[in-house]
Image (spheres, rainbow, N blue to C red):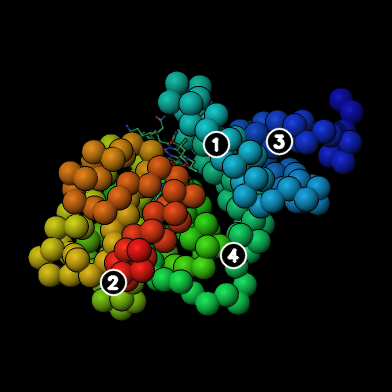
Amino acid sequence: MSEIVLSELSLDDLYDLMKEDLYDGLAEEITAEVHEALGRNQTPYTVLTKGLVAGMEIVGVDFRDGILFVPEVLMAAKAMKAGMAILRPLLAETGAPKIGKMVIGTVKGDIHDIGKNLVVMMMEGAGFEVIDLGINNSAEAYLKAIEEHKPEILGMSALLTTTMPYMRIVINALKEKGIRDEMVVLVGGAPLNEAFAEDIESDAYCRDAAVAVETAKKLIAIKRGDL
Ligand code: B1M
């Protein structure tokens, strides 16, 4: 088979190849393709959404349908992270004054972090200082970080229907400490929806990373009395 020359591909073909290679967990190829797309003046956000996120969506469908299994999905996640590592510094604004502070983490029992990492990247890119607690966070871990960093926003991510109820436990822990109203609580993750976010008494459900940024900006402005 003849070698693919990236520079000879149309943009559409380049994005299709990115989706295929992400599906196949080919981190090196993804790295080269992300560089190629950026070299063609594609914005980091476009590369992220049209290449990496679109590829992971296909992985998600085939994982659900039993076509892909955990090892393959892990490889895809590794390839996704390789692409995100290139985009992260490009999405992060340099030198701009920080517009707010956020503590974010995936909840206890849950090790999915790709979506949360995207939120971190986009929030940093929008000028927020973000303290990322990583995965599998207990209520105590959130409380400790809140005490230490005094954020205006708490973000929680959950990708499993079995771990999303843990968000309520964290919010109840904030209430018990009497600090719930000191911050905006944003939640996100594929199995959540607005009704759930309201039910657990968070401030908002964020469908994706871009919505998380918009919502954070808006709710912080309201809290500060600017809106
Ligand atoms: Co998991 N997994 N997984 N998995 N996995 C899902 C979530 C699943 C829906 C797959 C499926 O069946 N279709 C399913 C859950 C079913 C359910 O709960 N009803 C599932 C399962 C079952 C499991 C295991 C139990 C499988 C097993 O072991 N048998 C296991 C659980 C492990 C655990 O957590 N304890 C497991 C393991 C894994 C891997 C380790 C292999 C890997 C994770 C690698 C990693 O994250 N480092 C993995 C992956 C990759 C997935 C899928 C395929 C993709 C998730 C992803 O990265 N999406 C996923 C299928 C799917 O979601 N369609 C699946 C891309 C990402 C950009 O989107 O995470 O939704 P998302 O994030 C978005 C928004 O949701 C939002 O913004 C993000 C960016 O736009 N958002 C936030 C997310 N968090 C936010 C926080 C915010 C705001 C917005 O705060 C303010």
Vertical placement of residue 48 versus 1, above or below = below
Q: Residues within 10 Å of mark 4 (few under 14, many from 20)?
A: some
Q: Amino acid at mark 4?
A: Ala
Residue at image mark 1: 56
- Dot placed on the residue nearer the N-terminal end, 3 or 1: 3
Q: Amino acid at mark 1?
A: Met
Horizontal placement of 174 versus 72: left or right?
left
Question: Which tag is nearer the camera, tag 4 or tag 1?
Answer: 4
Q: Position of residue 217 (x, y in %)?
A: 42, 61
Q: CA distance from mark 2 to mark 1?
A: 32 Å
- Dot placed on the residue nearer the N-terminal end, 4 or 2: 4
Q: Position of residue 162 (x, y in %)?
A: 25, 39
Quadrant assignment, res 76: top right
Q: Residues within 10 Å of mark 1 (few under 14, many from 20)?
A: many
Question: Which tag is nearer the camera, tag 3 or tag 1?
Answer: 3
Q: CA distance from mark 3 to mark 1?
A: 13 Å
Q: CA distance from mark 3 to mark 4?
A: 23 Å
Q: Position of residue 215 (x, y in %)?
A: 39, 54
Residue at image mark 4: 92
Residue at image mark 3: 15
Vertical placement of residue 219 versus 196, above or below = below
Residue at image mark 2: 146
Picture quarter with ligand 1: top left
